[in-house]
Amino acid sequence: MRRSEGVGLFAKKVYAYLKKVPKGKVTTYKELANTIGSKAYRAVGSALSENKDPVKVPCYRVVCSDGTIGRYSAAGGLKKKIELLKKDGIKIKNGKIDLQRFGFRF
């Protein structure tokens, strides 16, 4: 198997689980990786940065394990990610999200 095929399968798994995160909740890169049986947290971020359909695959709902916002590579960047999170009803205080309140576990 070529490396690019493996990356595609990894991304598909990440996207499939991310679609299960409901509006008003977030998950973390680490949680997504663990859910698919991996410790490749950074690879989750890489897969999300390649997401071609942020409407169907809401990658803005993925944050860092410490509750910080993280990155967002879709149009509008971090400002857009914050806007989308707030639109979902997620409160951001001092640049962080309360994962006890807004976190989603698989």
Image: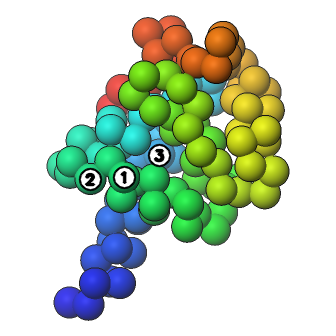
In this rendering, which labeled residue sits more in front, label 3 or label 2? Answer: 2
Do residues under tags 2 and 1 come within 8 Å of each other at their CB atoms? yes
Rendered location of residue 106, percent (x, y): 33, 32
Label 2: state its secondary structure. Answer: loop
| 3D distance between C-alphas at marks 3 and 2 | 15 Å
What residue appears at the point 51 percent right and 34 percent down from the top-left corner?
63
> Which is closer to the viewer, label 3 or label 1?
1
Three-letter residue code for mark 1 = Arg
- The three-letter amino acid code for the residue at tag 3 is Leu
Q: Position of residue 73 (x, y in %)?
A: 65, 56
How many numbered marks, from 0 up? 3
Q: Which residue is mark 3?
A: 18
Task: Kindly identify the residue that appears in the image at 79 percent across and 32 percent down.
Answer: 83
How far is the residue under mark 2 from the one under mark 1? 6 Å
**Is there any visible trace of residue 22 in the rendered image?**
no
Q: How is the image coloured?
A: rainbow
* Residue 101 in the figure: left or right of residue 94: left
Residue 68 x, y percent position in the rendering: 54, 26
* Disc 3 from disc 1: Cα separation: 15 Å
Res 9 quadrant in image: bottom left
Q: Which residue is mark 1?
A: 42
Q: Are marks 3 and 1 in contact (CB under 8 Å)?
A: no
Q: Are marks 3 and 2 in contact (CB under 8 Å)?
A: no
Query: Residue at coordinates 52% horizontally, 12% vertically from top-left?
Result: 98
